[in-house]
Amino acid sequence: GELPYGSTVILRIGEFMGVQGTLDYVLKFSKRVLGLNELVAKSTCEVDIGPINPGLLSFQYQEIKTNAFGMSNLPVGFFGLLKGRVTYIDTVWFDGNRWIERNYLE
């Protein structure tokens, strides 16, 4: 799907133990959208190191909160429906700072 106009996605990679870790999937808005500054989906994640999909990062939303109207870490009712959803990023290169994902042109 497409992002709302003027929004940016930021992945904040947390601690890893082996191939499993945590990340925050942050959807930041340049202007407030319905009073929202950002949505933060705290997630668990795993990197596939097998021979079929090496580098495939999967992450599962655990808790979704927002910063709105000057208050932070507010639970979000509607977006709570996404809890448990798994999303994938097909990684080609990650050196700790720069992340390049595979892209498929239509």
Image (cartoon, grey):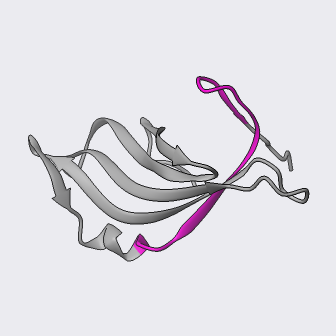
The quarter of the picture where residue 46 lies is bottom right
Residue drawn at x 90%, y 60% is 52
Percent coordinates x, y for residue 65 in the rendering: 26, 57
**Furthest residue toward right:** 51
Q: How many marks?
A: 0
The furthest residue to the left: 70
Residue found at x 39% / y 66%: 62
Front residue of 73/77: it is: 73
Image position of 99 with respect to 41: above or below: above
Q: Residue at x 24, y 72 (%)?
A: 77
Left of 95 or right of it: where is 79? left
Q: Verify whether residue 87 appears in magenta.
A: yes
**Which quadrant of the rendered structure holds the N terminus?**
bottom right
Q: Is residue 51 left or right of residue 12?
A: right
Residue at the front extreme, as displayed: 18
Pick the front one: 11 or 34: 11
Residue 89 belongs to magenta span: yes
* In this picture, residue 10 sits left or right of residue 89: left
Q: Position of residue 40 (x, y in %)?
A: 34, 50
Magenta-highlighted residues: 82-100
Q: Residue at x 60, y 27 (%)?
A: 96
The front one of 42 and 68 is 42
Question: Residue 94: where, in percent of width, then height?
Answer: 69, 31
Is the residue 20 above or below the residue 101 in the image?
A: below
Task: Point out residue 2 in the picture as x, y percentages from the top left corner.
Answer: 56, 52
